[in-house]
Amino acid sequence: MKKITIRQPDDWHLHLRDGTVLQAVAPYTAHFGRAIVMPNLVPPVVTTADAAAYRERILAALPEGSSFQPLMTLYLTENSSADDIAAGFRDGIVTAVKLYPAGATTNSHSGVRNIEKVYPVLERMAGIGMPLCVHGEVTDPDVDIFDREAVFIERVLAPLRQRIPELRIVMEHVTTSDGVDFVRAQNGAIAGTITPHHLIINRNAILVGGIRPHYYCLPVAKREKHRLALRAAATSGEGTFFLGTDSAPHIDPLKECACGCAGVFNAPNTMACLAHVFEQEGALDRLEAFASLNGPAFYRLLPNEKRITLVRRDEPVTMPAKITAGEHTITVFDPMFPIHWEVEDAD
Ligand SMILES: NC(=O)N[C@@H](CC(=O)O)C(=O)O
Ligand SMILES: [Zn+2]
Ligand SMILES: [Zn+2]
């Protein structure tokens, strides 16, 4: 039996939702130290007051004794107030701002249509050292969905870097070798988060043998060569790549229908899947950098003091395929291999 002990991980991109779903999913993240919590609720978390109220609802949903800390983000709109954002950051209520191009993903219709309109807010953030988290896909109907990340880099991210070089940016859920190369070329000024599922599946998972809605998320999984580039980046130990699960629960009826929502719910098996991937890549000694050290360093926070132990069982570990949320179920990410790893000391 193999074991590894690492500093307690953090999740730098997480959807906790609200209400019944929040109650159902929060316990699965409670063994993480912190998470950057996405603001794409309906209505979105736009103001510091919204974030403070949402934070209280999250804390109330945690299991007794959990020391998990939600790090709040604000949803950037073309009408966002730079003063409110700066005050929220100064007072420690908000950690980052999230840019959704309008229409790019789940609940993004209030997002930004014209990036020029938010440059004043971004300049203010650059001045105070506040990070911008980005969903990096264009939404132009003429751009193929598999190219939307690469085109976003060219049309939006690279010009933004030039225009405001001091702005600290996290390119979230990188899914292509183009994203990996771009992040690498910025010498630490931009970070990239990577999800467990994009390390495990390529686009065949969604389409071969039938349409599989539980593997559909945005940015959509790409070709195998991109998955391999992501695995190389995640397991490299390079400080600019770290874990953002993008665990994005939707109740099953909203996934299993003619126009299913984007999002993979992976919180219950994130660390088990990562241990599997890092072991396959001969990089278990770099799991801690990816899951527990690089993220806090980029966000200018200390790593967690606690440790967790991951154990590799000889027999596969059984995990529920679904969890219950009120009267519905939410399907858990199935990595399509037997899971042998589990978190032993979750405290
Ligand atoms: N990743 C997804 O497919 N979905 C996310 C939104 C997002 O992170 O883009 C969601 O909120 O459901
Ligand atoms: Zn996104
Ligand atoms: Zn997300």
Image (cartoon, rainbow, N blue to C red):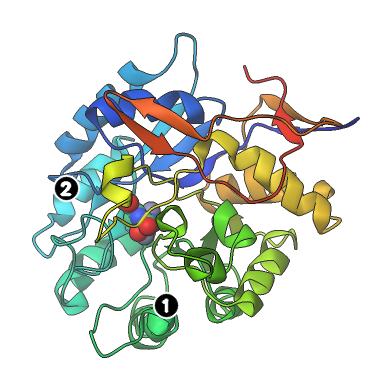
**Residue bearing mark 2:** 46
Q: Quadrant of residue 204?
A: bottom right
Indicate the quadrant containing the N terminus: top left, top right, bottom left or bottom right. Answer: top right
Can you name the residue that lies furthest to the left here?
79
Are the two marked residues, 2 and 1, in contact with CB atoms closer than 8 angstroms? no
Quarter, ligand 2: bottom left
**x 29%, y 55%: residue:** 261
* In front of the other: 86 or 306: 306
Quadrant of residue 87 within the rendered picture: top left
Mark 2 or mark 1, earlier in chain: 2
- Residue 203 left/right relative to 135: right
Q: Would you place residue 16 above or below residue 126 in this image?
A: above
Q: CA distance from mark 2 to mark 1?
A: 25 Å
Residue 140 horizontal/vertical position (percent): 24, 84
Query: Mark 2 belongs to which amino acid?
Result: Val
Residue type beneath disc 1: Glu
**Local crowd size for mark 2, using a 10 Å CA cut-off: few (<14), some (14–19), many (≥20):** many
Residue assigned mark 1:
149
